[in-house]
Amino acid sequence: MALPEIRLLAAAEAPEAFADLARLHAEEISSGFLTSLGTGLLARLYGAIGRSPDAFILTASANQHIVGFLCASTDTRRVYRYVLVHAWRHLLPALARHLLSWRTLRRCWETLRYPARSPVPDLPGAEILNFCVTQKLQRSGVGRALFSAMEGEYRRRGVRCIRIVTGANQLSAIRFYEKLGAEPVGTIEVHARTESRLFRYSIQDCHSAPSADA
Ligand SMILES: CC(C)(COP(=O)(O)OP(=O)(O)OC[C@H]1O[C@@H](n2cnc3c(N)ncnc32)[C@H](O)[C@@H]1OP(=O)(O)O)[C@@H](O)C(=O)NCCC(=O)NCCS
């Protein structure tokens, strides 16, 4: 199978691209907190993250549909700050009805507070914020192609090391990161009583980019 086309989403991308991305996120990470807030909010959130100078979004597309994406930051705290300052007007209407729930308020607070917490010393501020591939194309190399393009973008931005946080129940992601050579460095509770796995990953030089036999 030919790999879908990988490209970097532009800051001024059409809203449909972010809606596509939000749909994919909701399908593949169906039990996630952000998914519970609805695809309308997710699309606005990705739009705001995509405009942040400290973030980038790579997509894999086939037949004009996004079949996979990887969203990453060079500094997550700065991305959150950018989103709060520049996009709150767009996010608030979609978020308002959820804010009546104490549980949602707490989870919003935990999400915002999380980048400042570091259970492991010297963790880089750069990280993979989200990453998924549509179910029917998983295990066909799309994730690896997105990851490799991510490394290229990090190299271009001068970032040499990143952290990765993924839910302890996201087994496909854990296996993927292990296979690609990420170093497990511990666990963290982004949300209370929900364990996530923490990895550190050194961006490979061009000529030693991920090997199929790793
Ligand atoms: C993680 C994810 C993006 C990987 O994408 P992918 O396109 O399936 O990955 P690839 O096909 O490039 O896999 C590369 C290697 O990773 C490993 N791997 C990937 N998925 C795996 C799985 N479910 N079980 C075991 N190993 C797996 C394999 O070693 C694989 O190589 P192989 O197929 O030649 O054996 C995808 O599984 C996914 O969308 N998962 C659900 C969403 C998610 O958990 N996201 C993480 C948020 S941080």
Image: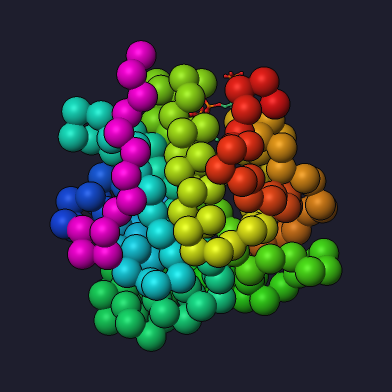
The residue nearer to you, when weighing 84 against 148, is 148
Q: Is residue 10 magenta?
A: yes
The residue lying at 23 percent from left, 35 percent from top is 65
Lateral position of residue 63 relative to residue 103, left or right: left
**Is residue 28 visible to the viewer in this orientation of the structure?**
no
Tell me which secondary structure the magenta stretch mostly adopts.
loop
Of all residues, the one furthest to the top in this rendering is 1
Q: Which residue lies furthest to the bottom in this view?
A: 85
Tell me residue 15's x, y (percent). 18, 57
Inspect the magenta stretch and tell me whether residue 80 lies in it. no
Residue in the foreground of this view, choosing between 104 and 113: 113
Specify start and end residues of the magenta stretch as a single range: 1-13
For the point 32% across and 69% down, which residue is it?
Answer: 51
In this view, the residue in front, 93 or 7, is: 7
Query: In the picture, residue 40 is in which quadrant?
Result: bottom left
Give residue 199's position: percent from left, percent from top. Answer: 72, 50
Instruction: Left or right? Give the position of 149 relative to 47.
Output: right
Q: Would you identify the image quadrant in which residue 107 lies?
A: bottom right
Give the x, y percent position of residue 77: 56, 76
Q: Is residue 94 above or below residue 87?
A: above
| Quadrant of image for the C terminus | top right
- Residue 203 appears in view: yes
Q: In this view, does 51 lie above or below 134?
A: below
- Residue at 48% in and 58% down: 156
State the residue at coordinates (30%, 33%): 5
Colour style of the rendered protein structure: rainbow
Ligand 1: give its quadrant.
Answer: top right
- In the rendered view, tell whether residue 172 sits above or below residue 34: above
Please state, as top left, top right, bottom left or bottom right, where the N terminus lies in the image: top left
